[in-house]
Image (cartoon, rainbow, N blue to C red):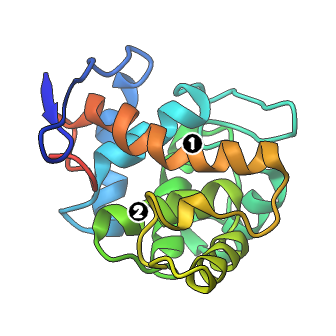
Amino acid sequence: MLVSCGPGIAVQAAEPPAAAKPYRAELVRSARAVWGMDAPVADFAGQFQQESGWNPDARSPVGAQGMAQFMPSTADWISQQFPELRSREPFNPSWAIRALVQYDQWLWQRVSGCDGCQRMAFTLSAYNGGLGWVNRDKKLATQRGLDAGVWFDAVATVNAGRSAANWRENRGYPQRILYQNAPRYLSWGSASCIR
């Protein structure tokens, strides 16, 4: 599948991995239930690919759990914040799918961007590194004369205090999901940065 990624840019998108296919219907259903019929399903699928490779039993060395790789404290918060997720089951694929799309929407409602692509990049940065860091980075970008509504080539270029390793990992996270992973899932639904 050939996918356009902007003016004059096209990439060859691979097919979704076999590990993803059992979760397609549930992801589409959950995403549309939370975000509406225009939910960026391809972005969420790309996020699961990035987080765990669709492995419901994934555990990271720092303690993140399940397909969505929530830290235990985040899973606790989500289970308290959203009544339909009170069961707190990060290793349950159904819970993880609903929790990821619900948490992404919660973050989306708290960030701004000049368009849907930039706003999703801010959302993903917040998912990966925390909403507080996104806000601090936006403030620093503004102080440096950069457009705080633009992630790529603007806010993504500043660091308001993260360690170098955490900053690099966080900056690559939206790029990998939105431009490398999401094209694989366009047959599942729309994406924020590619058509």
Q: Residue at x 30, y 43 (%)?
A: 42
Q: What number of labels is visible?
A: 2
Q: Earlier in the sequence, mark 1 or mark 2?
A: 2
Q: Identify whether 47 is placed above or below 98.
A: above
Eye-nearest disc, 1 or 2: 1
Q: Nearer the viewer, residue 19 or 143?
A: 143
- Relative side of 133 to 101, left or right: right
Image x and y of residue 170, in percent: 65, 49
Q: Identify whether 91 is placed above or below 136.
A: above
Observer able to see residue 40:
yes
Kind of residue at disc 1: Gly
Q: Nearer the viewer, residue 109 or 138?
A: 138
Q: Residue at x 56, y 44 (%)?
A: 173
Image x and y of residue 103, in percent: 55, 65
Disc 2 target residue = 120
- Relative side of 13 to 125, left or right: left
Kind of residue at disc 2: Met
Disc 1 target residue = 172
Q: Identify whether 154 is placed above or below 27.
A: below
Q: Identify whether 92 is placed above or below 74.
A: above
Secondary structure at numbered mark 1: helix
Looking at this rendering, what residue extends furthest in the top direction? Answer: 18
Image x and y of residue 168, in percent: 69, 44
Image x and y of residue 74, in percent: 75, 61
